[in-house]
Image (spheres, coloured by chain):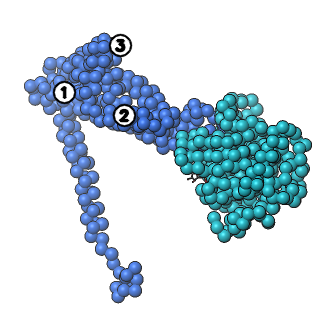
Chain colours: A cyan, B blue
Amino acid sequence: MTNEQMTSSETESTDEHEHGREQQTAPTPGSGLTDDADGGGTRSETERTVLEARNLDVFYGDEQALRDVDIDIPENRVTAVIGPSGCGKSTFLRSINRMNDLVDTCRVDGKLAFDGKNVYDEDVDPVALRRKIGMVFQSPNPFPKSIRDNVAYGLEVQGIDDNVDEAVEQALKRAALWDEVKDQLDESGLELSGGQQQRLCIARAIATDPEVILMDEPASALDPVATSKIEDLIEDLAEEYTVVIVTHNMQQAARISDKTAVFLTGGELVEFGETNQIFENPDHDRVEDYITGKFG
Amino acid sequence: MATETGGDTGFGQVSRAKDVAFRYVTLAATLVGIVSLAILLAYVTVDAVGWLDWQFLTSPPHPDPFEAGYYPALVGSIALMVLIALVTFPLGVGAAIYLEEYASDNLLTRFIQLNIANLAGVPSVVYGLLGLGLFVGLLNLGFGTLLVAGFTVSLLVLPIVIISAQEAIRAVPDSQRQASYGMGATKWQTIRNVVLPRAMPGIMTGTILALGRAIGETAPLIMIGAPTTVFGVPNSLFSKISAMPMQIYTWAQYPSTEFQYGVVAASAVTLLAVLLTINSIAILIRNKYQQQQS
Ligand SMILES: Nc1ncnc2c1ncn2[C@@H]1O[C@H](COP(=O)(O)OP(=O)(O)OP(=O)(O)O)[C@@H](O)[C@H]1O
Ligand SMILES: [Mg+2]
C-alpha cells in the first residue's frame, strides 16, 4: 500500500507539469503491468487524466468514509467502482461533483482535481462544477414534469434557451430512448417504465453536454433487459464522455469498464487498474476474495 | 408452531375475542365524535330555519330580531380571511423554506423550531394582548380596525401555517432535490422548480385549514377592541370591522329569545357554511394540483 502511494505521488508530479494529451499513461500503480495488458485495447493508448484524487479523505462527523484515496481517472473511458456495501463508493462519487456539500456533517480533506483544478479550492463554485459533471442516481428520479421538461431541466437551470427541442431530441437519441418516447414528449416522465425512467435520467444528465458522467448503481433497480440496454448505452457514452460508474454487479463491471477501482471496507481504495487485470489477476488477495465472492 | 403437529383439527384456531372487542371500542370512539357533531348541527339548523334567509344575509344588524342582518359581519370575516391569507402565506412559506432548506441543524434552529411549536399552542387571548400592545399601542393602527385584526389573527395562525408548510416541504423526496442539484441547479432554482411545486398542495391545505381556525376566533378580536356591532361593511384597511363569531357572541347576550335562538342559530349556520366552503376549496385546489403532478 505504502509502495503504491509513493508510486502514485510520482505520477502526480508528472501529471501536474505536463497535462499533454500525448503523455504516456503511467503504469498502473504497483501492478507492474502496463496499459497494453489489453484493458482498453480497442482504444488509443494515450489517455488524459480527467479526475485525479490525492490523499482524499472524507468524513461524516467523526466517522471516516474514505481513507487516503489516490486515483487517476482517464478521459473517455468507463471506470467502474466496486466494493462491498458501506465501503464509500457513493461517497467517492459524490465527492467528485461536491454533492457531499449538501450533507451538513460531511468534511473533505486532500485533493480532488478535475481537469487539473482542485474542486475543493475556495474559488470553485460547486454549482458550476456540477454543470460540467452529470450524475445519474441509483433509483430513477425523474421530475413530475413532462418528458421534454425533464430532459431540458439542465438547460433551463443554466439559462440556455435556444435549440432546446433539438438538444432534447439529441439527448434522448443518445440515451436510446427517442424512438420509444418521441410521440409523447409532453406526457409525464413518471408514466414511463423504470428502465425508461432511468434512460430519461441519463438523457437529462447528458443534455447539457457535461464532460464527466457519474453513475451510482444506475441499473440496480432494473430487470436484465433494461440493464443490458443501459450497459450498451454506457459503452456508447464513453466515446464522448468520461464515465465513472458504481456497481455491485461484478459481471457488469467486467463487461463495460476499462478501468476498475476496488474499495474495501473502511473506505480504502485497495486496487485500481485495468479491468481485465483486476478481474483476472488482482494484486491483492482481499480483492480476489471480494471479486470471487468469498467475502463482501 | 406448537400446533403444527398438535392434535387440533387442521391448523388449529386462534382466539379473535380481543380483535373483535378492540374493533368495537374504536368504532365507539369514532361514533362519539361524529354523532355529537351531527346532533349539534341538527339542533342549530333546526333553530335557524325561518331565520336564515336572504334578508338576514344582506342586512345590517338591527335591534329588532326580525330585521337583524349579518351582512357586515359576513363581509368583515371574509375581508379578514383574505388579509390573513395574504399575510400568512408568504411569511409562513418563507419561514418554512428557510427552516427546511437553508438553516443548518444547529441549536439555534432547534430552539426556533421548538418555539414555533410552542407558539402554535399559545391561547388566542394572549395573541389578542400582543396585538393590542403592538399594533394598537406601539404602531398606532387603531382600535378594532381590519388591519389590526388581520395582523393579530395572522400572528395567531402563522405557526400553524409554518408547521404545515414545513411538513409539506419535508415530504418532498430528497431524491428530487438531489436530481436537481446534480444538474447544477442553485438552491433557489431547486426550491422553485422542484420543491415548491411538489409541496404546494400540502402548503395550500395547511394554510386553508389555518384560515378555518382563524375564522372562528373571537378572543383576539375582543382584545384589540373590535366593536361589538358594526353597521357597515369595511371599505378600507382602517375601517372598524366585525366578524361573524364576534357578532354571534354579541347577539347571544341579548335578552330576547328570538335573538338567543333564531338569530344566533342562523349566524352559526352561516359561519359553518363559510367554513365548509373554505375547506372544500382547499380540497379542490389540492386535488387539482395533485393531478397536474402525475
Ligand atoms: N449522509 C451520511 N451521513 C453519515 N454517514 C454517511 C452518510 N452517507 C454515508 N455515510 C457513511 O459512510 C460510509 C460509506 O457510505 P457510502 O454510501 O459511500 O457506501 P457505499 O459504498 O455507496 O455503499 P452501498 O454499496 O451500500 O451503496 C458508510 O459507513 C455510511 O454509513
Ligand atoms: Mg452507494
Instruction: Check contact, mark 3 vs mark 1: CB within 8 A.
Output: no
Horizontally, is A11 left or right of B141 in the view? right
Whichever of callouts 1 and 2 sits on the residue coming sooner in the sequence is 2
Q: CA distance from mark 1 to mark 2?
A: 30 Å
**Would you say residue B89 is visible in this rendering?**
no
The single residue placed furthest to the bottom in the displayed view is B7
In this view, the residue in front, B276 or A208, is: A208
Q: Residue at x 85, y 46 (%)?
A: A47
Same chain for the residues at labels 3 and 2, yes or no? yes
Instruction: Check contact, mark 3 vs mark 2: CB within 8 A.
Output: no
**Which residue bears the numbered disc 2?**
B116
**Which residue bears the numbered disc 3?**
B236
- Circle 3: element type: loop
In this view, the residue in front, B289 or A263, is: A263
Q: Residues within 10 Å of mark 1 (few under 14, many from 20)?
A: some
Q: Could you tell me the amino acid type at mark 3?
A: Ser
The vertical placement of B236 against B4, above or below, is: above
Q: CA distance from mark 3 to mark 2?
A: 32 Å
The C terminus of chain B: image quadrant: top right
